[in-house]
Amino acid sequence: MPSIGARGLPVPGYLTAHYWWAYVHPRAVRFFERQWLVNLILWGNYGRLRSAALKELGHPINNKVLQIACAYGDITPKMVGQLRDSGSLDVIDILPVQLANLGAKLGPDERVKLHCMDSAALKFDADRFDQVLIFFLLHEQPADVREATLREAARVLKPGGTLLIVDYSKPSWYHPLRYLWKPVLRVLEPFAHDLLNRGIQHSIPSDLPLNVTLKRDFFGGLYQMIRLQRDFGAAQKADQ
Ligand SMILES: C[S@@+](CC[C@H](N)C(=O)[O-])C[C@H]1O[C@@H](n2cnc3c(N)ncnc32)[C@H](O)[C@@H]1O
């Protein structure tokens, strides 16, 4: 099992208030860590979304990848299976119970490191990673934390590096689940509404040096994958 690099941090209020049942309580982790259940929660789209993200990250992965926040299901083990040569994966999460759960899903591998860190205040140096993945995290964070997470993701990316975001999106007006899904999200995911209304793309602070290079809708627009590239500004200045 990969080692977990730090002791526990204070758990943010939004997690204990709204997500204790999904992530914080050890019984929740045991309950939700089922591939079929994760797939059911995503209306049968887990495999498609996971495969699309893994394809974007590259097969093989031979550069430095950061995954911001653990996820249930097998996306991370599959990502590790794609690592080759100089490829490495760092995963951060604020909950030790989540990191322990992920560690149990991964075999020993010195290229993989798990860290107890807040996505809004990463302890990595700037310009460190070639790719950053944020898989279904942003809709669970209040707007200020979401913005800080995106700022941190941009900061730790190397110039030219890519940020891949997979998350909920606003479904098309004719989507049959649209009217059922809204009240469900409002009760279970109180911060998702805001992300859906603004859209992932417009939730990214405009001063960040990130440009959208791919936008793909899934399942009638209920889910979206966005790839952004950090501009080369810093590297070009250094070269001059
Ligand atoms: C990635 S999100 C949602 C994952 C999705 N439901 C799934 O399992 O596919 C859930 C994770 O985000 C983590 N998380 C939430 N806020 C965080 C923060 N500020 N810093 C680091 N991790 C955070 C939670 O501890 C949890 O493990």
Image (cartoon, grey):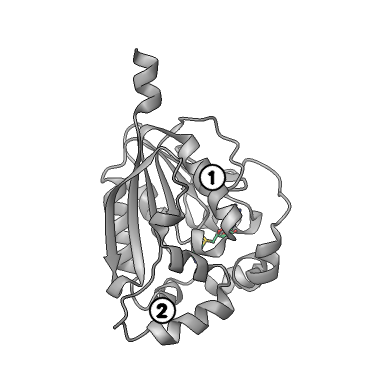
Q: Residues within 10 Å of mark 2 (few under 14, many from 20)?
A: few
Q: Quadrant of residue 77?
A: bottom left
Q: Nearer the viewer, mark 1 or mark 2?
A: 2
Residue positioned most to the top:
240
Residue identified by numbered label 2: 40
Residue at image position (44%, 63%) is: 198
Residue flagged by tag 1: what amino acid is it?
Answer: Pro
Left or right placement of residue 99 versus residue 75 in this view? right
Residue identified by numbered label 1: 2
Q: Residues within 10 Å of mark 1 (few under 14, many from 20)?
A: many
Left or right placement of residue 228 versus residue 1 in this view? left
Residue at image position (44%, 45%) is: 206
Residue at image position (34%, 77%) is: 44
- The image position of residue 223, as x and y in percent, is 36, 68
Residue 112 disc label? none
Q: Secondary structure at mark 1?
A: loop
- The image position of residue 127, as x and y in percent, is 46, 30
Q: Is residue 92 visible in the rendered structure shown here?
A: no
- The image position of residue 211, as x and y in percent, is 33, 43
Separation of residues labelled 1 and 2 (CA atoms): 29 Å
Q: Secondary structure at mark 2?
A: helix
- The image position of residue 47, as x and y in percent, is 32, 67
Residue at image position (60%, 54%) is: 144
Quadrant of picture, ligand 1: bottom right
Q: Is residue 129 visible in the rendered structure shown here?
A: yes
Left or right placement of residue 178 versus residue 16 in this view? left
Residue flagged by tag 2: what amino acid is it?
Answer: Leu
Judge by depth and name the residue closer to the eye, 91 or 124. 124
Ligand 1 closer than 8 Å to label 1 CB: no
